[in-house]
Image (cartoon, rainbow, N blue to C red):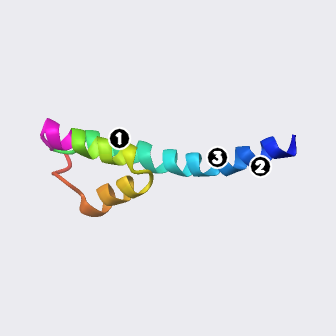
Amino acid sequence: MEMIMVLGVFWGVPLLIYLLCAIPALRELKGRGLDETSRAVWALAIVAIPIMGALAFWIMQPGEQR
C-alpha cells in the first residue's frame, strides 16, 4: 500500500506539472497567427518535450496573437 502511494506521488506530481504547462501553451498556440506546418511543429514540441517545449513556446512567442 505504501509503495502505491509513493509511486502515485512519483508519477502524479510531474504529470500535473506537465499538464499545467502543456494545456495553456496549446490553447495559446491555437490563437497564434501561424501557418499549419508551424503550428503542427510547435504542438509536437509542446507535447513531446515535457515542460521544456511549453517554456520554449512562451519564451519565443512565435507568430502574432490574434
Which badge, 2 or 1, comes first in the chain's sequence?
Answer: 2
- Judge the density around disc 1: few (<14), some (14-19), many (≥20) Cα neighbours within 10 Å: few
Say above or below: 13 vs 36. below
Could you tell me if the residues under marks 1 and 3 are in contact, i.e. CB atoms within 8 Å? no
**Residue type for callout 3:** Trp
Q: Which residue is mark 2?
A: 6
Residue 27 vs residue 18, the one in the foreground: 18
Q: CA distance from mark 2 to mark 3?
A: 9 Å
Q: Which mark sits nearer the N-terminus, 1 or 3?
A: 3
The residue at 23%/43% (across/down) is: 41
**Amino acid found under the numbered disc labelled 1:** Arg
| Residue position for label 3 | 11
Return the mark for residue 27: 1
* Image spot of residue 35 (x, y percent): 12, 40
Q: Residue furthest bottom?
A: 59
Q: Position of residue 53 (x, y in %)?
A: 36, 53
Residue 35 is covered by the magenta coloring:
yes
Q: Name the residue at 72% across, 43% down.
A: 8
Q: Position of residue 27 (x, y in %)?
A: 35, 41
Q: Tell me the quarter of the picture where residue 32 sits.
A: top left
Q: Compare residues 5 and 62 and report the one nearer the observer.
A: 5
The mark that comes first in sequence, 2 or 3, is 2
Q: Are marks 2 and 1 in contact (CB under 8 Å)?
A: no
Span shown in magenta: 34-39
